[in-house]
Image (cartoon, grey):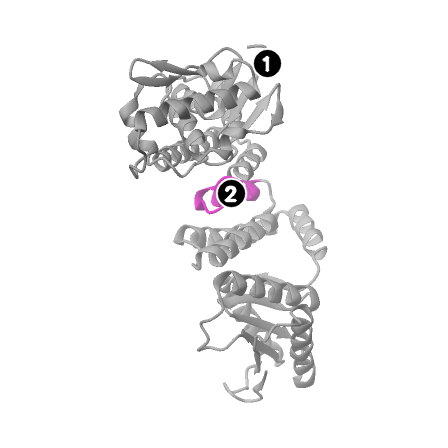
Amino acid sequence: MEHSVRIQMMGNYLIFIDEQRIENPVIRSRKGSALLAFLILHRGYQVPNQRLLRELWSDNIVTNPENALKTLVSRTRSMLNQMAEGLGACLVSDRGAYHWEQREGVRVDALELMDLFDTLERIKDKDEKREIYKKLLSLYKGDLYQTGSLEEEAAYAERMHRQYLEAVYNYIEMLREEEAYNEISAVCRTALEVDNFDDRLHIELMKSMVHLNRVSDAMAQYRHAANITYRYLGAEPSENMREFYAHLNRSRKSLKSNLDAIRNELRQSSKEHGAFVCDYNMFKEIYNLEMRNLERLGTTMFLGVIMIGNAEDNEMDFIRQDNIMSGLIEILRTNLRKGDIITHFAPTIVALLLPTVNYDTGSMVMERVRQLFYKRYPNSNIPFHHRLGMLGPDTSADEYDIEGS
C-alpha cells in the first residue's frame, strides 16, 4: 500500500493516513461501521455470511438479506478505497464468508492492544515489559468504540477494559518494587483519564504522593475522588478510600519529624485562595476540631445551611440540579473567606462552617450569597432557603438560629 493507514477504535472511530486524520465516511453508515468493526475484532477468522446477517440485521427487516450483505460489503470497500487506494482489499470475500486481512502498512490500535495483552502474559524480562506497558498506555485512549449495532461489542469493550486495568495494576506493582513513585503518579494519572471512578487508581496515586512527601496533594486527590463519586454516582467514598484517608492523616502526623516537608506543605497551602470545599466526612472532622477550639477559647462560630428548591419539589431534573449546585458551591468557594468550610451535604443542600463571625456578620454573609446566586441565575424561580445557627460551648440547639429565603 502506498500510504500508511492507522485505524483508531479505542475511544473513537478515526482513520489516519500518513498520520494525518481524514474524514471517515464509514462512520456515517451504521451498518458499514459495524461490519468493519466486527470483521476487525474477529481477525484471523472467516465469519460466515449467516452470522453477519444475524448480527447486522437482527430485526430481520430486509427482503433479500444475502444481496443486502453483498451491497454493504461493496459500499464499505468503496469507502475504504476512497480514503486510501487498496484499503478496501482488507475486506476479503471467502466462500460463504468474509474476513479482515491486515495488509502491509495498515495498523489497528485495538488489534495491537490485543497482541500486547497476549505478549505480557508470556514475557518475563522487566525491561521488555516496561516498554510494552508504555506502549499500552499510549494506545488505550479510551474504551473500545461501540457502533451500537452488535451484541458482542459490549463484551469486547468490557474485556479489554478489564485487561487494561490489570496491566496498569501490574505495571504499578513493578514500579513500586523499583520505588519509582514519580512514574507511578504519571501512570495513575494517565489511567484515570480512562477510568476516573477506579478507587485503586486513586489510592495508588495518593500512595505515590505520600512517598514523595506531597501529602497535601494526596489530600487534594482524595477530595477530588470523593467529590466526583458523590457528584456523579450519588455515593460516599468506598471503605477502601475512607481507610486510606485515615492513613493520610497518620502520614501527615509522621511529617512532624521532617521540617522541610512541613514548610513546603505550608507554603503550598498558603497559596490557595477562597473557602475550603471538602466531603462530609472531612467536614465533620474539621467541625470536631473547631468545637474543641471553641471550648478551649470560649468563642463561637456559625453553622450555615443552604437548600435550593423545596423539600417536596421533585421537578428539577438531575442535570439542571447538578449544574446549579456546582454553581452555588463555586459562588461560595470564591466569595467566602479562606477559613470558611463548605461541604455538599445532600443533593440540594450545602453546609457551611463560618468561624469568628457574629450574628450580624453571619446574616450579611448569607444574604450576600443569596444575591450572588440570583445574579448568576437571574431568570430562575428556584427557591433559595438558608438557616444560620450559632455553635459554641454554651449555646443550645435552637438558640440564636436565624432563617431566611
User: Tag count in the figure?
Assistant: 2
Name the disc covering residue 207, or none: 2
Whether residue 225 is visible to the viewer of this picture, yes or no, is yes
Magenta stretch: dominant SS?
Answer: helix
Residue at x-position 62% and y-position 62%: 276
Q: What element carries label 2?
A: helix
Q: Which residue lies furthest to the front in this view?
A: 63
What amino acid type should be assigned to the residue bearing mark 1?
His
- Which of the 4 image quarters holds residue 324? bottom right
SS at badge 1: loop
Residue 383 in the image: above or below residue 334: below
Task: Give amino acid for label 2.
Answer: Lys
Report, in whole angstroms, how far the alpha carbon at label 1 lies from the one at label 2: 46 Å
Give 35 or 244, whichever is nearer the viewer.
35
Give the residue at x 59% y 35%.
182
Disc 1 designates what residue? 3
Nearer to the camera, 302 or 71: 71
Quadrant position of residue 371: bottom right
Residue 66 in percent (x, y) is at: 31, 24
- The disc, 1 or 2, on the residue closer to the chain's N-terminal end is 1
Please give the range of residues in magenta: 192-211
> Residue 382, how many percent across, how many down?
57, 75
Q: Is residue 204 magenta?
A: yes
The residue shown at (31%, 29%) is 64
x then y, percent, for residue 162: 39, 35
| Mark 2 burial class by Cα count in 10 Å: few <14, some 14-19, many 20+ | many
